[in-house]
Amino acid sequence: MSAYDYLAHFYDQLTADVDYTALADHYERLITRDGRAPELVLDLACGTGRLTRLLAERGHQMIGVDASAQMLSQAVEQGGDILYLQQSMGSLDLYGTVDAAVCSLDGMNYLSPTELETALGRIFLFLAPGSVFAFDLNTPEKLMGQDGAIFCDEREDVLCLWRCAFDSAERACYYDFDLFTPKGDLWMRRSETHVEYAYTRAEIQAALEKAGFGESSITEDPENMPPGTKAGRMFISAVKP
């Protein structure tokens, strides 16, 4: 089963603890640094569009891109004057350039090494010169540390169980999700698997440079992250010369 085929319907419930306002504050600071005033902003792996809508409310013209039709369906239902496109990052194809791009909540971890190289090239292509690309990643230490872990999240109309397994050869963490939803007196079970790839700071730096990005910043310092960010995440920003 593909990622987010079923999880999309419950994603906002299961991520209700994410402080999207703080996330929007942080990303807006990154893309507007040094006096930049981006009008057209690209939100990659936008999911249900919660960050996309917040940035739109702050005056940015937004394009939301996601590979999952189900996630985009949830985003469209929330309304807003936003262009949503169903595309993978590796096949990104826009009508012109954008003034900034963001990718939040480890969307870039979903890319394999080959896909990461291709995606960064496409993002670089559609960024206007002088624009910022800002994103975050789960660190290798966090992904490796989840090996064997089991999590449970119970909400009013869904029970979500997920198991984690880290493949050292692939340097990837596999998340097997089981979603249980009520159907009459019974519960219906649906399953899907997500994969996140581990990247070191040096690997990300090298990939950005290969794509053509110039000035870049990578931080795991809590003082330079959105308030409440848990350990095991790094924030990256890079400028197209």
Image (tube, grey):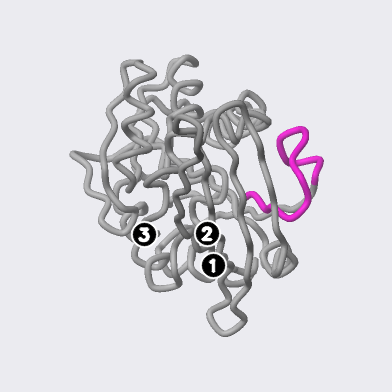
Pointer 1 residue: 197
Measured in 3D between alpha carbons, the distance from the residue under mark 1 to the one under mark 3, in whole angstroms, is 14 Å
User: Which residue is found at the position 74% from the left and 53% from the top?
Assistant: 220
Pointer 3 residue: 119
Q: Nearer the viewer, residue 61 or 169?
A: 169
Tell me if mark 2 has few (under 14), some (14-19) or many (20+) residues whose alpha carbon lies within 10 angstroms of its own.
many
User: Which residue is found at the position 31% from the left and 16% from the top?
Assistant: 81
Label 2 SS:
helix
Pointer 2 residue: 109
Q: Which residues are magenta?
A: 222-235
Q: Position of residue 59 (x, y in %)?
A: 44, 15
The answer to whether residue 100 is left or right of residue 77 is right
| Quarter residue 119 falls in | bottom left
- Does any portion of residue 43 appear in the rendered image? yes
Amino acid bearing label 3: Ala
Which mark is first along the chain, 2 or 3?
A: 2
Q: Is residue 67 magenta?
A: no
Amino acid bearing label 1: Tyr
